[in-house]
Image (cartoon, grey):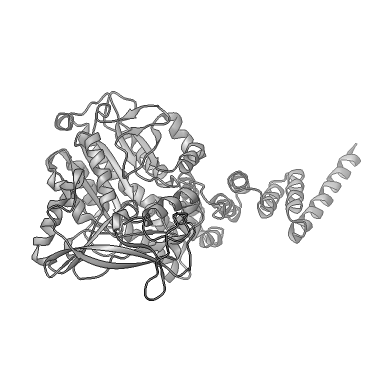
């Protein structure tokens, strides 16, 4: 049963039901995909909007940095080249007059879309020749209107909107069968999509609906979820705050794999059957990402069976990772998530004639590409890019490396930090983590003129990939401090002005601007900046001292000018 079960205080006049140990039962023995917990998930992201990430509620670094964007761009560029090659056009029945759509599912705060677009445009010189201005159009999607409004107004995305290579769509991943583009007004369906599509989804399938099973001594059992609360009453069963305090309990029921899934989902029954008949899985615990596969099923139909699905998630790549009897795990982190069965997704694509590629390690964040609509031989560039970009040193490896250096190297050298920044693809979050080491070591006598010139180049690359999201992470301000350390006060001022624009008024920013104005000899502007700092924080002692000093200097200058007449 779902949210119409044993409830308390919802106006249904139902008698509350309590477990023997006293817990309030909100839902009793429900099929997992029908549970009320998925309504909480949607309500959480709808209410939080971009704040889910900008306020640090939901972790996301591993999927929103320049390094993973660069890796994905290489793979997508490979597929783009394959599709618009002479053999690809024939094999895919592609139309070079039309762009190939690249769609991010659940783009959230929009940062990864921005970074991926940046990395794609770095390869502009090598784009395959087509009859459209650009060979692709990027679509950012989410189910909540709040995020779309944020993207459309974000300054970093405006150049791409003007270029005509980015569009937006409100899209419910589990249900929608067509895509209505907001900027162009075009509706994408199987009649209007002329080329294969690339679908990108990071940390999305782990938050869509699942079904849970276990195989106990070779017999298939369905996992049924009971939702409990320690409170005496829960007046609002749509409150996403329940995520923090609910407790799942699991019971198991013997079922047949042959007719468990019905309707359009019946194509999942053979996957269950194969798992049941596998000796290696005689005792195992299995999740099927039915919400994600519903999305794939709809997009496969929309693209006439020509889909390239690139996904990163907490996942099982291999069936041996599912061995052992254990209850399904629901991880809580503001919202919640479940492990994604990439092995089931792989078998789903193979059942339709497709194939897949996977990162090789069982531990950590996984990336996989699922390809439909062509034999392997036609997508050689994409396969090679996946091998070179993801299978030796992937996103999880980079995330671990930068975190380990930060945690385990108390005093990294300037060259080590610069090397890490360059390996990251000039990521602004990595810069922010190591900012103080750079500021302390980039000035003379620690850094030569050559190194300082290289740092200037690196900083420009970092700022070019900066996507302002959280006012508490003021990258422009820290870059301004770095340029002050190199005594480049004019450059520093530009970044402090950007800091005021992106992150708001702050007394220290105006104070630093005052120092920069002073060092370049603009004492009137320096006085104005110090006074503005004092208006914001009247007890800011340093600004007060400098304000007095500038007022005295201005008085001296005025006196000299008067005397000269």
**Foreground of the two, 145 or 538:** 145
Give 327 or 119, whichever is nearer the viewer.
327
Residue 415 point in image, percent of width and height: 43, 60
User: Where residue 308 appears, x then y in whole percent?
Assistant: 23, 42
- The answer to whether 78 appears left or right of 218 in the picture is right
Q: In the image, residue 252 lies at what x, y percent?
A: 23, 66
Residue at image x 76%, y 51%? 535
- In the rendered view of the protein, which quadrant contains the N terminus? bottom left
* Residue shown at the point (51%, 37%) measured from the top left: 153
Q: Residue at x 41, y 56 (%)?
A: 61
Query: Count the marks: how many?
Result: 0
Place of residue 129 in the rendered image (x, y in percent of width and height, measured from the top left): 26, 28
Q: Nearer the viewer, residue 565 or 126?
A: 126
Q: Determine which quarter of the picture holds residue 396.
A: bottom left
Q: Quadrant of the C terminus?
A: top right
* 565 lies left or right of 321: right
Up-down: is 530 above or below 156? below
Taking depth in this image into account, of 556 and 384 the one nearest to the observer is 384
Q: Residue placed at 39% from the left, 76% from the top?
A: 21
């Amino acid at each position: 049963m779902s949210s119409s079960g044993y409830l308390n205080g919802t106006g249904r006049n139902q008698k509350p039901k309590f477990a023997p140990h006293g817990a309030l039962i909100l839902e009793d023995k429900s099929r997992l995909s029908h549970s009320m917990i998925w309504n909480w998930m949607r309500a959480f992201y709808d209410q939080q909007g971009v704040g889910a990430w900008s306020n640090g509620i939901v972790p996301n670094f591993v999927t929103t940095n320049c390094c993973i964007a660069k890796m994905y761009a290489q793979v997508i560029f490979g597929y783009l080249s394959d599709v618009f090659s002479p053999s690809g056009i024939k094999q895919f029945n592609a139309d070079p007059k039309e762009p190939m759509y690249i769609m991010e599912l659940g783009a959230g705060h929009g940062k990864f879309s921005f970074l991926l677009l940046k990395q794609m445009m770095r390869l502009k010189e090598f784009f395959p020749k087509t009859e459209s201005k650009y060979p692709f159009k990027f679509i950012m999607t989410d189910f909540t209107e709040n995020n779309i409004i944020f993207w459309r107004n974000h300054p970093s995305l405006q150049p791409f909107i003007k270029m005509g290579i980015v569009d937006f769509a409100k899209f419910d991943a589990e249900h929608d069968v067509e895509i209505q583009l907001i900027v162009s007004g075009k509706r994408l369906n199987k009649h209007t999509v002329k080329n294969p599509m690339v679908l990108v989804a990071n940390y999305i399938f782990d938050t869509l609906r699942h079904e849970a099973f276990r195989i106990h001594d070779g017999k298939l059992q369905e996992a049924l979820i009971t939702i409990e609360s320690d409170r005496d009453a829960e007046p609002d069963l749509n409150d996403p705050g329940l995520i923090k305090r609910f407790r799942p309990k699991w019971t198991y029921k013997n079922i047949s794999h042959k007719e468990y899934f019905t309707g359009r989902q019946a194509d999942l029954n053979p996957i269950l059957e194969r798992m049941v008949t596998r000796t290696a899985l005689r005792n195992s615990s299995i999740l099927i990402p039915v919400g994600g596969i519903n999305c794939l099923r709809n997009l496969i139909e929309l693209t006439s069976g020509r889909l390239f699905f690139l996904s990163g998630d907490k996942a099982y790549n291999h069936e041996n990772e599912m061995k052992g009897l254990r209850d399904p795990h629901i991880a809580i982190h503001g919202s919640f998530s479940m492990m994604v069965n990439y092995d089931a997704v792989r078998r789903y694509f193979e059942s339709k004639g497709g194939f897949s590629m996977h990162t090789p390690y069982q531990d950590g964040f996984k990336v996989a590409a699922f390809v439909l609509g062509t034999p392997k031989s036609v997508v050689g560039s994409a396969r090679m890019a996946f091998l070179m970009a993801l299978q030796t040193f992937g996103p999880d490896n980079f995330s671990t490396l930068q975190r380990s250096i930060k945690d385990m190297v108390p005093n990294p050298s300037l060259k080590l930090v610069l090397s890490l920044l360059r390996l990251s693809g000039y990521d602004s979050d990595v810069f922010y983590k190591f900012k103080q080491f750079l500021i302390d070591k980039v000035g003379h006598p620690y850094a030569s003129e050559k190194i300082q010139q290289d740092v200037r180049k690196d900083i420009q690359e970092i700022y070019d990939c900066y996507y302002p999201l959280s006012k508490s992470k003021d990258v422009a301000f820290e870059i301004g401090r770095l340029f002050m350390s190199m005594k480049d006060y004019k450059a520093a001022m530009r970044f402090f002005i950007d800091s005021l624009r992106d992150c708001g008024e702050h007394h220290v920013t105006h104070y630093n601007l005052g120092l920069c104005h002073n060092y370049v000899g603009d004492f009137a502007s320096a006085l104005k900046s110090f006074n503005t700092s004092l208006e914001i924080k009247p007890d800011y002692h340093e600004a007060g001292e400098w304000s007095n000093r500038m007022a005295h200097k201005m008085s001296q200058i005025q006196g000299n000018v008067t005397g000269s007449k």
